[in-house]
Image (tube, rainbow, N blue to C red):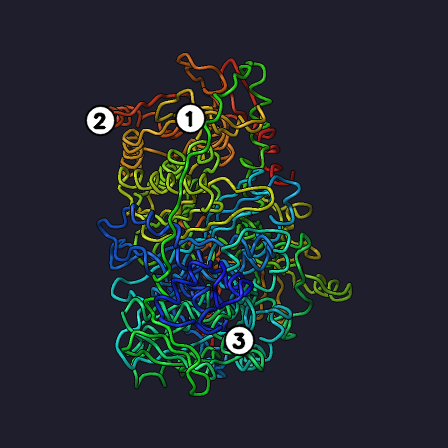
């Protein structure tokens, strides 16, 4: 099992993802430079957090045109697992691999804090066995306020594409539990096919007890299991 | 200054005095041209030359076991074991932040990151010490500075893990922004910024050079006045994305052969960077200005040499290796250009298209500024403190809530949640307590980091206040279980040409020196920021101490907050009649007076040794330094950090309520421990000769002080969390 971790020049969660994958999960990592067009046969592509190309214009607005994203798009079209975290989620939306956009937090400020997430599905490679589970994870972003037009939001709900919602520790949504003003308390969504996930929280920052939580490891384990099943079945 | 061949206006523009000009002419044997004068002006500025403080700084102890690099380089370096070393430094960015809070603070962060990078270290933590005038008037400054620190640090991907903020009238016209960076480097990869042998190439990389920030160093060495806003062009604009690329590229570069050294371009730009690397190697250098990539056309050599454009580094490369270096930078889309070379003649010569336009001895530029004699005179003795009415028992609960709601004591979460403090997967003790702890990935080592300083104590007595700043920073680290290793200091004062400020400067340096010797923590880097004055007068002498400590095993780290109901609450150290300079005086009595708390350094060392040893033996569940606000505030903080109440009873021992509960006696910790650990803790305390008293137990939903107060935690939390919104 090998994860590909995409590195744009302004990416900074690449090493954190690598650490979580190698040290906490025990799987392999291949770093994919933004100019690469070859994904090197990885089982899952992670688009990590950071500021891709500075993001002065709009997060991910330039990254979508990078060579590596062409390869990622083809990979996704073939059914490959693509996992955008934080800036990676923003890039996926800009690239049109996921609908909607991530705009400035409603509080207009950067937020780095722990949040709770309710997992809405467990039939995805990313979230096996996690349906209804309340997970605790850090966020660290200024543009994590998920918005889309009413039709898109309705379609996302109808097709059960909302994977994670901000909630309180009991799993209740609403009020203070939503840290950035996201529509429908959305913290993460998946494409209709279920192989492209975008989420604002950072699972790689909570894959060890030393860092204050291990819920992130549940997602990495799920992906690893799914990839093995794919290999085994294929 | 009659008889000078130069217009006084010209001298004022480069911030040189008439005497200094005469000295330059004498040493050169001729008049300098305009470019040379500009170069000398920036390097002889207080900011670059330390001409007023240099002689005093020699009094600081700078060596000790484990010190790999003391002051004089871009950052200090200490060994931490397992082949690793920590490089760190603090630097002020006060004046830029006063006129342009966002960019001033942002570029302050950028500059200190590059200082640590220049040692070959990867920056792993940022901390900031901030001072503002009272809220709400200073809201704009606070907002701008916090946004600037976050805007830069969050983008480069280095966690901001600590800091401190105080509000006081003393800073209303001159806020302070001191930024500290800590980096990690393998001891065998440590770099020093020196030019090395003749013929080595000088490679400039990063942002193209523009007209921004010209005379920034000179600006930093003037008092702020009405015209300061017009100095805004002297403030640079940061590009954190470029910095991130520069950082990664320079770290990759260290794997290449032929890379001799790295130097940051900060204050005084290219002039300072080239002169410093040459000076450290006892060499000279030649620069061809037309080779310097520019942001705009038509720039003169003067502008090129003095520009303070951000995000630039100078790399010293052996001839024959420049192509690989340029290629390595190109991978990060960075333009690297050979702009000159190291020479043996000891001069810095500047060429424009082959014609020499300046030639100055490096020794005149660096270290050549005549040390300025200070004329210290203590201020007139202050009248003895006026008596104040004692605190009545019935007022204790409301007083506690008022103190918790003070912007100086309230929760810092509204600030640190705006900084990414987790990136790097190393923050194993997050901000909010006494110090942050970062693990060194791949080892069990934990690096504890803090930045601290109480200027009110320094105002009342700079000698004692500076000692307390050192002791308290050490206490912050010890509260996590760490052993203090070394410190970096930032001395922020007013105009040293005034005798009282000169006296303050002398006293704070002596205070730091005494405390460093007694606590065995050397000074390995630092910064002096003078002329912090505005129409409203000089700031308080503000000693800011950044300190780094080590935990052999970070799994033994201690949080500040209570963790388990049923634990005993203990007080280590002695409470005395120390109300002078306290937050209680400011908030409740409305005036700060009297002597600052007494500091007994031998006792301080003993109590710190006790807590460290108890932590290492696993006898403690939490430890918190008793600081501003005193014992009752410290108890409340332990409850609020941990989300657990406590019931306590304090023995007055003849003290009145105010000093007992809110006095700021030094050398104290609030500890919590399992009742089973008590006997061993008592034995340990006796061994160290430290008072250790059981004052209560953890549990419940309120802070209960028997016979005096019962404050529901929810009320305390509301006051504490709203404090910064005031």
Q: CA distance from mark 1 to mark 3?
A: 53 Å
Q: Which residue is mark 1?
A: B566
Closest to the observer, B255 or B425: B255
Placement of B492 over or under A34, stated as above or below:
above
Q: Residue at x 46, y 27 (%)?
A: B630
Residue B655 quadrant: top left
* Mark 3, secondary structure of its residue: loop
* Mark 1, secondary structure of its residue: loop
Q: Position of residue B455 (x, y in %)?
A: 47, 38
Q: Which residue is mark 3?
A: A80
Please say whether residue A219 is visible from this viewpoint: no
Please say whether residue B570 is visible from this viewpoint: yes
Is label 2 or label 3 in front?
A: 2
Please check whether the numbered discs 2 and 3 fall on a single chain. Answer: no
Q: CA distance from mark 2 to mark 3?
A: 65 Å
Q: Position of residue B314 (x, y in %)?
A: 40, 73
Q: How many marks?
A: 3
* Mark 2, secondary structure of its residue: helix
Q: Which residue is mark 2?
A: B687
Q: How would you rate the neighbour count of disc 1 (Cα within 10 Å): few for under 14, some for 14-19, many for 20 or more?
A: some
Placement of B281 over or under B721, stated as above or below:
below
Q: How would you rate the neighbour count of disc 2 (Cα within 10 Å): few for under 14, some for 14-19, many for 20 or more?
A: few
Is label 1 or label 3 in front?
A: 1
């Amino acid at each position: 099992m090998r994860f590909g971790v995409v590195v744009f020049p302004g990416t900074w969660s690449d090493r954190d993802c690598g650490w979580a994958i190698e040290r906490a999960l025990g799987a392999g990592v291949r770093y994919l430079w933004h100019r690469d067009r070859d994904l090197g046969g990885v089982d899952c592509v992670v688009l990590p957090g950071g500021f891709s190309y500075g993001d002065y214009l709009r997060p991910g607005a330039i990254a979508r045109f990078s060579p590596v994203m062409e390869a990622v798009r083809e990979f996704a079209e073939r059914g490959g697992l693509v996992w955008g975290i934080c800036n990676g989620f923003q890039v996926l939306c800009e690239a049109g691999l996921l609908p909607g956009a991530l705009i400035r937090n409603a509080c207009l400020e950067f937020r780095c804090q722990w949040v709770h997430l309710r997992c809405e599905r467990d039939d995805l490679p990313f979230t096996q066995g996690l349906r209804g589970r309340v997970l605790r994870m850090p966020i660290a972003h200024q543009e994590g306020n998920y918005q889309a037009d009413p039709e898109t939001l309705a379609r996302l709900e109808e097709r059960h594409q909302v994977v994670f919602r901000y909630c309180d520790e009991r799993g209740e949504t609403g009020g203070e539990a939503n840290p950035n003003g996201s529509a429908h308390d959305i913290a993460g969504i998946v494409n209709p096919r279920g192989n492209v996930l975008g989420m604002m929280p950072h699972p790689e920052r909570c894959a060890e007890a030393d860092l204050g939580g291990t819920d992130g490891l549940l997602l990495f384990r799920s992906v690893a299991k799914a990839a093995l099943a794919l290999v085994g079945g294929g | 200054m009659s008889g000078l061949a130069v217009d006084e206006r010209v001298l004022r523009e480069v911030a040189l005095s008439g005497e200094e000009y005469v000295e330059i002419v004498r040493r050169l044997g001729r008049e300098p041209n305009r470019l040379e004068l500009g170069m000398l002006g920036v390097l002889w500025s207080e900011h670059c030359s330390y001409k007023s403080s240099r002689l005093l700084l020699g009094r600081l102890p700078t060596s000790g076991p484990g010190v790999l690099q003391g002051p004089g380089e871009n950052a200090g370096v200490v060994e931490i074991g397992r082949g690793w070393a920590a490089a760190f430094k603090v630097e002020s960015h006060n004046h830029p932040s006063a006129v342009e809070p966002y960019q001033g603070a942002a570029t302050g962060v950028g500059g200190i990151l590059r200082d640590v990078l220049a040692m070959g270290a990867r920056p792993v933590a940022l901390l900031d010490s901030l001072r503002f005038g009272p809220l709400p008037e200073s809201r704009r400054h606070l907002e701008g500075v916090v946004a600037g620190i976050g805007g830069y640090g969050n983008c480069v991907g280095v966690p901001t893990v600590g800091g401190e903020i105080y509000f006081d009238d003393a800073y209303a016209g001159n806020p302070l922004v001191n930024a500290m960076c800590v980096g990690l480097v393998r001891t065998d990869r440590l770099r020093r910024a020196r030019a090395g042998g003749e013929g080595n190439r000088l490679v400039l990389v990063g942002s193209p050079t523009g007209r921004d920030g010209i005379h920034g160093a000179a600006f930093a060495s003037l008092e702020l006045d009405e015209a300061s806003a017009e100095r805004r062009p002297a403030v640079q604009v940061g590009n954190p994305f470029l910095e991130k690329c520069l950082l990664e590229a320079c770290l990759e570069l260290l794997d290449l052969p032929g890379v001799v050294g790295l130097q940051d371009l900060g204050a005084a730009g290219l002039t300072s960077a080239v002169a410093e690397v040459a000076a450290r190697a006892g060499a000279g250098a030649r620069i061809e200005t037309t080779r310097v990539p520019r942001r705009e056309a038509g720039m003169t050599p003067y502008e090129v040499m003095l520009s303070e454009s951000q995000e630039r580094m100078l790399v010293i490369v052996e001839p024959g290796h420049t192509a690989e270096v340029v290629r390595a930078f190109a991978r990060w889309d960075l333009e690297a250009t050979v702009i000159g070379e190291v020479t043996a003649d000891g001069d810095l010569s500047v060429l424009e298209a082959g014609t020499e336009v300046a030639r100055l001895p490096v020794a005149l530029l660096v270290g050549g500024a005549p040390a300025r004699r200070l004329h210290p005179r203590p201020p007139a003795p202050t009248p003895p403190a006026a008596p104040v009415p004692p605190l009545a028992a019935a007022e204790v609960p409301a007083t506690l809530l008022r103190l918790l709601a003070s912007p100086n004591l309230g929760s810092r979460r509204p600030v640190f949640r705006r900084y990414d403090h987790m990136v790097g997967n190393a923050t194993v003790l997050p901000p909010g307590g006494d110090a942050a702890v970062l693990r060194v990935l791949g080892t069990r080592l934990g690096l504890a980091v803090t930045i601290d300083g109480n200027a009110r104590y320094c105002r009342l007595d700079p000698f004692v206040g500076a000692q307390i700043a050192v002791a308290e920073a050490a206490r912050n680290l010890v509260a996590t279980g760490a052993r203090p290793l070394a410190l970096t200091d930032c001395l922020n004062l007013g105009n040293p040409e005034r005798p009282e400020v000169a006296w303050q400067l002398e006293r704070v340096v002596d205070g730091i020196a005494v405390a460093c010797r007694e606590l065995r923590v050397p000074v390995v880097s630092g910064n002096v920021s003078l002329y912090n004055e505005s129409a409203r007068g000089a700031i308080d002498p503000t000693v800011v101490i950044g300190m780094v400590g080590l935990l052999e095993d970070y799994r033994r780290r201690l949080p500040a907050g209570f963790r388990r109901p049923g634990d005993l609450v203990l007080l280590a150290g002695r409470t005395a009649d120390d109300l002078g300079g306290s937050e209680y005086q400011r908030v409740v009595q409305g005036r700060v007076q009297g002597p600052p708390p007494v500091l007994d350094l031998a006792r301080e060392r003993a109590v710190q040794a006790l807590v460290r040893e108890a932590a290492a033996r696993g006898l403690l569940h939490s430890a918190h330094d008793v600081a501003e606000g005193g014992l009752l505030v410290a108890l409340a903080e332990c409850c609020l950090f941990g989300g657990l109440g406590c019931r306590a009873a304090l023995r007055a021992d003849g003290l009145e309520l105010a000093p007992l509960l809110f006095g700021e006696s030094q050398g104290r910790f609030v500890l919590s421990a399992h009742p089973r650990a008590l006997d061993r803790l008592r034995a340990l305390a006796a061994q160290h000769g430290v008072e250790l008293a059981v004052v209560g137990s953890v549990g419940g939903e309120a802070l209960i002080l028997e016979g005096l107060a019962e404050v529901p935690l929810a009320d305390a939390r509301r006051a504490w969390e709203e404090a910064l919104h005031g």
